[in-house]
Amino acid sequence: MSRVGCYICNYNGKDYAGKCIQSVLEQVKIDENFRLYLVDNASTDGTGEYIRERFKEQVCIIQNPINRGGAGGFNTALKDAIDRNYDYVILLDNDIIVEEGCISAFIQYMDSHPDTGCVGAKIMIMDRPDYIQEFGGQLDFERYDLIKNYWYELDRGCQDVIESDWVSSCALIARMDAVRKTDLFPEENFLYWDDIEFTYQIKLAGYRVASLASAKVYHKGKKKPVTTTANGYYGMRNRIKFFSRYEAEERLPHLCENMLDEYFQIFFGSASKGFHAANSSRMSALDDFVHKHYGKADADKIYAMDEKEDQVRRIAAGHELVFVELPVKEEPRLMEAVGVLCRRLHEIGDVARIAAVVSPSMLEEMQKRLRRYYDQEIEFTDKVSEGALVFRPCGHFREVEEDICPVVWFDKYLNCVGNHEDFARVRAYPYIKEFFVRIHYEWLMKGILAERGRVRRGGDGKRGMFWVGSGYDGKRGMF
């Protein structure tokens, strides 16, 4: 019988941790083949005492002396699982509720698929239990981004197993033989991209990585509104760090140019909405990547979020009825934009009615499509009132080539082209972008090449995570 260690990572979340532990205990027996652990990152809310008193010997508490973050907490778990010589390790965030049958589904799948190194759960939104938060994902080496399956979609059923490049560490099971062939979680990330790198290492080691629908969990996720620029900082720094390590050598110029292209797109959009602190923090993230300043960011690089300049609210002010044109062709990013805009108009509250503009022949089909992106009731019409406010979706506002004022272009980031001045600024976009890319290319490429050299040396003098096989062959992730 397989021996399994299940580890829950916690920091100041005793109530969540208690519920997570209870959901595990309701479906497994604690014995020599299954042990449950709480890795506590130096909590100050009395988590240790609470868990010991409530669960007694059913849970073993491993106490980290300092808060090492999610990556550090899970590395404590993995090192303990290696020492105890488990067959499998299960990792859970503390704000997870494990649905009945999840643990057995995890173990049975691993037992029957010895070629599989890691399996992730089907992660549902705890506060909206009919919606999928994510279900595995792939890496996009063209756009250098993540492809997240069923991202925040209503659950209408999905395939039971999805082959993945990575899975989220908030709920996964891993084969310990595969774990031993990795360098564990990159703690220097501090936040974000650490679980992606850990599970992708398992795939590079020759194992399958998959996502299993019959292993379902519910995730509370973010519990507080975003108040600082930390997400943008760590997301930008650690994302380029990841792809610098894993892209093929001959494609590094492509990586550098594409990253700069996208970063300018982000900077341009944020500046148009008045997010200057966010842009300053992201620029610090790029500079820290170039100079290899990893770990927790210096305090002077993380700012309070800017007062939001809400373009949608400003444009919609004084309009009780707003018309939103639906795209004629099936294009997910346009429908996603419509869903985002409708939610924002609903949040504003000043707009009493939203009417989706669609031809009668497409009405039934478009009603079904829109429901995937916006689940509130909405009016549908094929006529626009004279003098009414009309929004038209676009892929991204930088792509706008026609001034249709007073009709307003908008994208899924709620960048808007609402007047002639906005259009003139957008038309200048390609020229400003070309200048931005040109002056930053050599600087960023220096950071990319330095990261490659750092990886070959093993970063901290230890074996590099990419020594798979006999040596570097120019392919992704193979050093």
Image: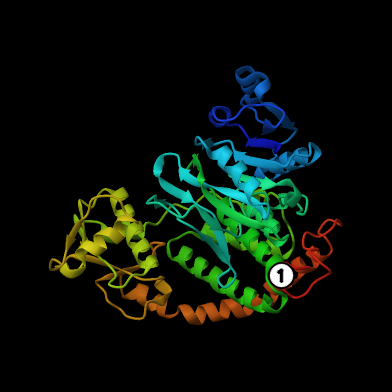
Residue 262 image-quadrant placement: bottom right
Q: Residue at image x 73%, y 35%?
A: 66
- Front residue of 233 and 37: 37
Say which residue label 1 marks.
Answer: 448
Farthest residue, direction right? 461
| Residue type, numbered disc 1 | Ile
Above/below status of 416 relative to 48: below
Q: Is residue 136 left or right of residue 62?
A: left
Residue drawn 39% across and 42% down? 128
What is the x, y in percent for residue 81?
75, 39
Between residue 294 and residue 309, name the one nearer to us.
Answer: 294
Image coords of residue 243 (percent x, y): 66, 66
Element at badge 1?
helix
Q: Quadrant of residue 164?
A: bottom right
Give the crowd class for mark 1: few <14, some 14-19, many >=20 residues within 10 Å: many
Q: How many numbered callouts?
A: 1
Is residue 336 something that shows in the picture?
yes
Foreground residue among 278 and 139: 139
Position of 450 relative to 134 (above/below): below
